[in-house]
Every structure is written in C-alpha cells, then in structure tokens.
Image (tube, rainbow, N blue to C red):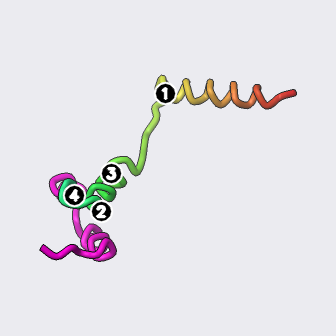
Amino acid sequence: MAQLNDDVLRYIVSYLSPETLKKVNAANPVFFDEWMKSRYESLTFTRNDELLDHLRYVSLVADLSCLP
C-alpha cells in the first residue's frame, strides 16, 4: 500500500470531526496527533480546583526563590 504524504493527511484531517479522528487515530501518527490536539486544545479550571491552587503555590514559591 502506498504511503500518503503527511501534508495530504493533515489536509484530510481538516475535514474530519473529533469523533471520527477518535476512531481512526491508530491508523497514522498524523491522525493521532490531530486527535490529541482536538481533545486537549483547551483546559478549564474552576475557582476551587486543586491543580489551580497548586500552580498558584508553585508560581509564588518560584517568585520568592528569585528574591535576593
């Protein structure tokens, strides 16, 4: 079977829905990469999110460690 150029596959991906990409992501690394991008393109934090609190703490510690 002939291999398709990655540019051609990316063009094809632009017409596929995230649901379709989920089904075909194992067929080619280009499909997998685009499926992961569509799946994780945004991340929502809530005000009481523990990860957000941790990131704020780490940022504060990093800022304080830069002080003389």
Three-letter code for the amino acid on which mark 1 is drawn: Leu
Rendered view: 24 above or below 44: below
Question: Disc 1 designates what residue?
Answer: 51
Three-letter code for the amino acid on which mark 2 is drawn: Val
Rendered view: 27 above or below 8: above
Instruction: Please report whichever mark, 4 or 2, sits nearer to the chain's N-terminal start.
Output: 4
What residue is at 33 percent from the left and 75 percent from the top? 7
What residue is at 55 percent from the left and 25 percent from the top? 53
Task: Give the extent of the magenta segment.
Answer: 1-24
Q: Which mark is residue 10?
A: none
- Report the residue that reaches farthest toward the right: 68
Q: Which mark is residue 36?
A: 3
Instruction: Please report whichever mark, 3 or 2, sits nearer to the chain's N-terminal start.
Output: 2
Of tags 2 and 1, which is closer to the observer?
Answer: 2
Question: Disc 2 designates what residue?
Answer: 30
Packing grade of label 3 (10 A; few <14, some 14-19, many >=20) is some
Q: How far apart are marks 2 and 1 (CA)?
A: 30 Å
Instruction: Please report whichever mark, 4 or 1, sits nearer to the chain's N-terminal start.
Output: 4
Does residue 2 show up magenta in the picture?
Answer: yes
Instruction: Please report whichever mark, 2 or 1, sits nearer to the chain's N-terminal start.
Output: 2
Question: Disc 4 designates what residue?
Answer: 21
Quadrant location of the C terminus in the rendered image: top right
Three-letter code for the amino acid on which mark 3 is drawn: Met
